[in-house]
Image (spheres, rainbow, N blue to C red):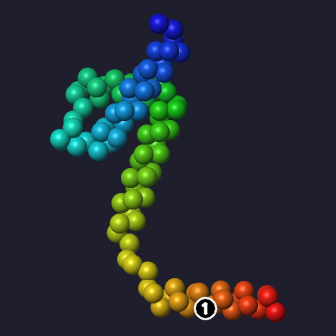
Amino acid sequence: MSGALRQMITCHWTARRIQRYLDADPAAPLTPGEVTRLEEHLATCARCSEVMRQHRLLHRALSLWSGRRPVDQASVDRMRAVLDDLVDGHQR
């Protein structure tokens, strides 16, 4: 098997397990051998490492987003009024 084909297969295998690795879900754990194989691949593959980084950023963003307070509707209404005034002023 050529090196490029082997790399492609390993990337595919890794991509299918990255989320399980990050979640560390006890209902779908990776075996110690899978963890080792995945970590070794991530240490040498820039593309899969970038996918891992993106998954982590998304997880972080979602965890921060869920903790935010709802937007004050009165503030939204005031901002819309300001924007309407600006738009109307430019159309005259």
Give the left or right position of residue 3, taking residue 19 as reference.
right
Q: Secondary structure at mark 1?
A: helix
Q: Position of residue 34 (x, y in %)?
A: 28, 26
Which of 85 and 3 lies nearest the eye of the viewer? Answer: 85
Q: At which x and y percent is residue 78?
A: 55, 91
Q: Amino acid at mark 1?
A: Ala
76 lies left or right of 68: right
Query: Could you tell me if residue 7 is visible in this image?
Result: yes
Q: Residue at x 59, y 87 (%)?
A: 80
40 and 79: which is toward the camera: 79
Mark yes or no: residue 41 visible.
no
In the rendered view, would you say 83 is above or below 22?
A: below
Residue 30 position, x and y percent, is 24, 32
Query: Dot 1 corresponds to which residue?
Result: 81
For image coordinates 49% across by 27% down, the residue present is: 45
Quarter of the picture holding the C terminus: bottom right
> Residue at the spot x=37%, y=77% of the render?
69
Q: Is residue 59 above or below residue 73?
A: above
Q: How many residues crowd around disc 1 within 10 Å: few (fewer than 14), some, or many (20 or more)?
A: few
Vertical comparison of 36 with 70: above or below: above
x and y percent of residue 3 in the render? Answer: 51, 12
Quadrant assignment, res 84: bottom right
